[in-house]
Image (spheres, grey):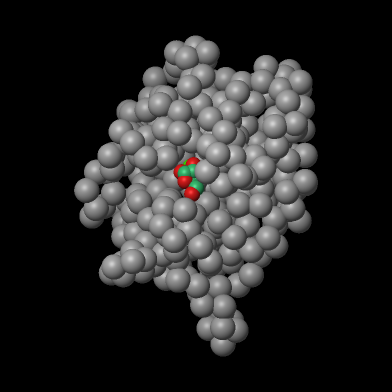
Amino acid sequence: MTEKYIIMDVDTGVDDSMALMLAGACKDLHILALTCTYGNNEVEKTTRNTQKIAELLGIDAPVAMGAVRPMIDPPMDFSGGLGPMIHGLDGLGNVGDRLQEPVHPVSELKAPDLMAEVIRKAPEMVTIVATGPLTNVAAFLLSWPELADKVELIALMGGAAYGGNLAFTVEANIGHDPEAAAVVFHSSIPKVVFGLDATMGVYITDEERVAMAEKSAVGAFMKDCLQPYADTYRQLANWPGAVLHDSLPVAWLIDPDTVTLKPVVIDIELNGRLNRGATVCDFNSNHTADTNTLIAMQADREKIIALHLEAAGHYQ
Ligand code: RIB
Ligand code: CA
């Protein structure tokens, strides 16, 4: 693969943690910064979780705190719902206290400004990998429009051509901040969208988690970190394993053959009574001819799981 300079905007979270493990193990992915948003938990927790996971993985990159709430909608209530069932009360599968307290302080810059600083200084174009609500990315685009030309690509986990998980036709990362998503999708920066159409098929089975644990202490932590997630998906949907939504953008950067992409024109529904936050997809070829957006419609689960097992072995 060719070397890539990336910023990961995350709401760590257990599947965000697996994406970080994958990225941290790839020598050709240069992680310039980790920026954190609310989403799976309040931003103070997602930031601390990101610091702890980054230090576990030896990722040498600044960590910045970002948005505390969506642009328009009221602040999220983190007390109930599926979040704690999937990500645990601590956001790390209730095993986050196994990790040492962060040694490195959070950046003095807030997320959009850290994005701007590293993009301005980067030796090459930068790819933004977003695996949470898009509030930070939108704030960066609105605050620093002159830097958009240095962003090669936005690779984001979010949305769905068909279906949803926050509502019948709304996926969580987009649905938590539809206005921010609209800012991102209306930008001219090329985007690759990894929505539920592709991510739901990339689950890790219990047996594969055991194999990952045997690779290293990092793999063992990730196995346990994913336990509440796996239990919840099995109980609620009889799903064969925890779904590694956030790993797909990273897996695709590492090996583009892991995912099948289609040109699409996407806009965000902002006013629908039933589908506010939906990614409305137009696959009509007359419209997609000059689109700057691709969407993942299929993924190779076995290839992507193999990448994770290889990555776990990297952290001896
Ligand atoms: O819909 C899946 C997304 O919501 C993932 O990014 C997961 O971490 C949660 O944020
Ligand atoms: Ca996430």
Residue at the image point whose x is 67% and y is 42% from the top: 240
Residue at the image point whose x is 52% and y is 43% from the top: 236
Residue 223 percent coordinates (x, y): 64, 26
Eyeballing the image, is 4 above or below 288?
A: above
Residue 114 percent coordinates (x, y): 39, 38
Q: Residue furthest bottom?
A: 286
The residue closer to the viewer here, 109 or 86, is 86
The residue closer to the viewer here, 160 or 185, is 160
In this image, 84 relative to 225: left or right? left
Position of the C terminus by quadrant: top right
Tell me the quarter of the picture where residue 294 sits: bottom right
Tell me the quarter of the picture where residue 220 sits: top right
Res 6 seen here: no
Residue at the image point whose x is 41% and y is 32% from the top: 84
Residue 88 percent coordinates (x, y): 45, 28
The residue closer to the viewer here, 126 or 241, is 241
Eyeballing the image, is 260 above or below 76?
A: below
Res 259 seen here: yes
Eyeballing the image, is 74 above or below 232?
A: below
Residue at the image point whose x is 38% and y is 55% from the top: 175
Residue 101 percent coordinates (x, y): 45, 13
Tell me the quarter of the picture where residue 15 sits: top right
Count of marks overlaid on the render: 0
